[in-house]
Amino acid sequence: MFERLKEDIQCVKDRDPAARNSVEIMLLYPGFRAVRMYRRAHWFFEHRMFFMARWVSQRCVRKTNIEIHPGAQIGRRLFIDHGTGVVIGETAVIGDDVTLYQGVTLGGTGKDTGKRHPTIGNNVLIGAGSKVLGPFAIGDNSNVAAGSVVLSEIPPNSTAVGSPARVVKQNGKRVDRLDQVHIPDPVAQELCVLHHRIDKLEKLLKQEQERNKEANNTERKD
């Protein structure tokens, strides 16, 4: 227990340059507090004391604004930075050395049963406001950019950006020109497609009208 406590404190020191000392982390960091309360809630959950597990987890929500279902499986050295609005679902699985920023959701789509939430590999970083929805995996050593909506599997050693998220870098090499600044607007893209189709239909309608006009003129001459 004390080894895990020391690990959780040290991972905050390693990843947050604003962290000054262990006492400050233990007393003032909501992410650290949420992880420690999750560990207790998960113990109750594993021993089938489900009411106590949910009581501890809901108490954690009130105190930290971070909701971690006690049934989630979380590895070592999870760092939740800032933490406000983080939600982790019941069947989520999180590996070691994962970093989550504020507003991250590891949730479901409402269409799946059984395994409903994502599996996050080791050494993964998920940026602020990102939503990872569904029972798929994000591979080891991957990064998800802030504000992304991930709806399908991300391979290991990848960087994913956008809504819906696309892999833009894998194994250190760019595989897409997309980046966090030049993200295409999906609504504008759909409007462009519709505009193109309308132009095409108007041309076909005009051609049909001209053929009908020529046919009518030919009938009058006859």
Image (spheres, helix red, strand yellow):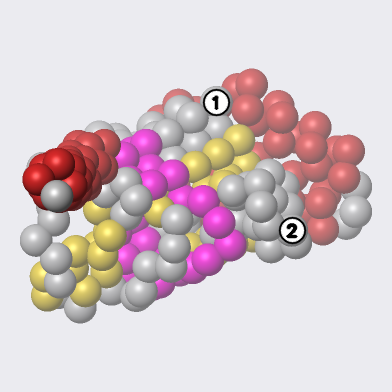
Magenta segment, which residues? 121-149
Secondary element at image label 1: loop
Q: Which mark is residue 53?
A: none
* Side of 117 where 185 appears, left or right: left
Pinpoint residue 173: horizontal percent, then vertical percent: 12, 75
* Amino acid carrying mark 2 in the image: Thr
Furthest residue toward bottom: 171
Residue occupying the point 65% across, 30% down: 60
| Image vertical order of residue 173 relative to residue 69, above or below | below
Pinpoint residue 163: horizontal percent, then vertical percent: 32, 46
Choose between 188 and 105: the one closer to the eye: 188
Residue occupying the point 26% across, 64% down: 167
* Side of 69 where 55 appears, left or right: right
Q: Residues within 10 Å of mark 2 (few under 14, many from 20)?
A: few
Choose between 78 and 165: the one closer to the eye: 165
Residue at numbered disc 1? 65
Residue occupying the point 75% across, 34% down: 56
| Image vertical order of residue 159 relative to residue 215, above or below | below
Type of secondary structure dominating the magenta stretch: loop
- Residue 196 seen anywhere in this rendered image of the structure: no
Find out whether residue 140 is within the magenta segment. yes
Find out whether residue 172 is within the magenta segment. no
